Amino acid sequence: MLRQGLLMARGLCQLMSNKLSDSLHRNIMKHLNGNTRSGYAWTSLQNIRAVTMSPWPFTPSQPRDYSLPNASWSSEMQRLYEHYNNMCEMETEGGKKIKGAWRRLPSYNRSLKYATGGQCLSKLLQGKARIFTRNIEEQGAGFEYVVFINKQEKTCVCVFQAGHLLEGPPGHVHGGAIATIIDSVTGTHATYLSGPVMTANLTINYRSPIPLGSVVLVHSSLDKTEGRKTFLSCQVTNTDGSKMHTEATGLFVSIGVGHLLGL
Amino acid sequence: MLRQGLLMARGLCQLMSNKLSDSLHRNIMKHLNGNTRSGYAWTSLQNIRAVTMSPWPFTPSQPRDYSLPNASWSSEMQRLYEHYNNMCEMETEGGKKIKGAWRRLPSYNRSLKYATGGQCLSKLLQGKARIFTRNIEEQGAGFEYVVFINKQEKTCVCVFQAGHLLEGPPGHVHGGAIATIIDSVTGTHATYLSGPVMTANLTINYRSPIPLGSVVLVHSSLDKTEGRKTFLSCQVTNTDGSKMHTEATGLFVSIGVGHLLGL
């Protein structure tokens, strides 16, 4: 049973490897092959979704990649997307295209349905479950965001447009929605750096409110790693960096992939 | 303009006072009458929604109170609701009904539309905006919760059933959704104790994951107040209190109501 589960997970990773940055894929495969297990309870593995979010083999068609532009994106959101996306691929003097320092990470709205973390979820619940940040189908209403990773600098940036369903204070983004995008971005970054992780701590300082409908940048940077712990810092700023909205730190603990499969 | 805004807000508070606990209403009215203003930028005023969430005078009908039971509530959720709700009203030996130590707080999905925090939101955006924790119409799919306040003990408890659209790790609740319910409950509690506040800090320690679809209790208690600062502690446990899922602290800073109105 254990072996079957690991083989299924490995198979999924291999099938999806064309979607993944090499580094992220390598980290996940290392953990699968090592069959390491952790005594920690995991709390926030949403960051693993880059690996596991394809509904394959549950639907025959390609899943929607929510990190790609859509009609709801403002011109500022589109401009910033293009700014970072253009740095994902460079053109040499000879006209040859080569990989740049940045990678765009795809994003899906479903997790691996048979991996329930050991919980006996009903089939109905499993079929209906959606990733929290991608649970609204209406474009522009909820979290519109795209995450880019810089391999060399070990930094990560997310361009985030906050939709009208994320309201907290009148006309502004809910503190919980800000915490959510911070958890998602730093968790994705930690997974990229360290393989599967859980969120152990988030410390968030709210400096100034984010207007509903506006676009902000979420920056994540590595502070240090200590054994199985990855420490990250995060800043949410306006798009020219002149205004600090929120500052945070995150601590993530590496776990074995067995946790994902509920083995 | 300033006076007109304050009068409108005061009128709304008076009209809605029958919905509010006396203490919460008194605190808001004190701030309105005092016309106090704060130098702080506010970040998370979702806790003020108990006062401002009625869409009146924008719709003629009574708005839906999301804190009342619906068909999606599990038997455990319903049982806990009745447990606390029964303590909101006591019967004397003579058969007379008197107020108990607990109060149920109503909850709505819209904020005061003309109070945009100084932002020039488009009319379209204002009309479509919804409170983050109440943005999903499908019963049982998102955040199902009800908040009770104990006046005497200065504590607060929330019964929370996490719907299938709040997924993070496969089969479990997203860390951001947990942060969201913590921010909402502690923010509401701080508002009840201190009048309008903003979230200044949230520190969250994730101990063990929350299965999707399960019911948990969110407890909030007052640590101390220092001038305009209100310090709260929060624990998220399973329903019999034997398992700690998440521990957190929150710091909230009192603000003037002028912030709400964007004056």
Image (spheres, coloured by chain):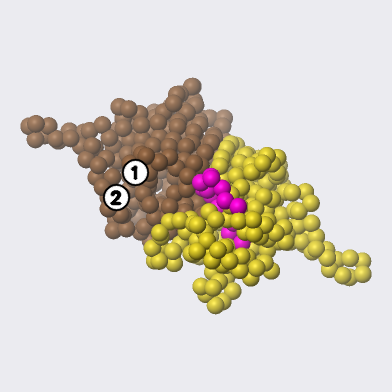
Chain colours: A yellow, B brown
Where is residue A259 shown, x and y percent of the image?
A: 53, 54
| Relative vertical location of residue B261 with respect to residue A45 in this rendering, above or below | above
Specify the segment rendered in magenta: A36-51
Residue at 47% over, 28% down: B231
Query: Please, what secondary structure does the residue beneath circle 1 have?
Result: loop
Q: Nearer the viewer, residue A225 or A221?
A: A225
Q: Chain of mark 2?
A: B
Query: Please, what secondary structure does the residue beneath circle 2 have?
Result: helix
Q: Which residue is mark 1?
A: B239
- Furthest residue toward right: A94
> Would you say residue A17 is visible in this rendering?
yes
Q: Nearer the viewer, residue A258 or A206?
A: A258
Is A230 left or right of A2, judged from the image as shown? right
| Relative vertical location of residue A158 with respect to residue B189 in this rendering, above or below | below
- The total number of labels drawn is 2
Q: Chain of mark 1?
A: B
Where is residue B224 shown, x and y percent of the image?
A: 45, 24
Q: Is residue A46 magenta?
A: yes
- Furthest residue toward top: B227
Where is residue A240 shown, x and y percent of the image?
A: 72, 47
> How far apart are the alpha carbons under marks 1 and 2?
8 Å
Residue B76's disc is 2
Residue neighbourhood size for the residue with mark 1, other residues' Cα within 10 Å, grouped as few (<14), some (14–19), many (≥20) = some
Q: Nearer the viewer, residue A94 or A2?
A: A2
Q: Is residue A98 magenta?
A: no
Is B158 left or right of A95, judged from the image as shown? left
Residue at 40% over, 35% down: B220
Do the residues under discs 1 and 2 have CB atoms within 8 angstroms? yes
Amino acid type, label 1: Thr
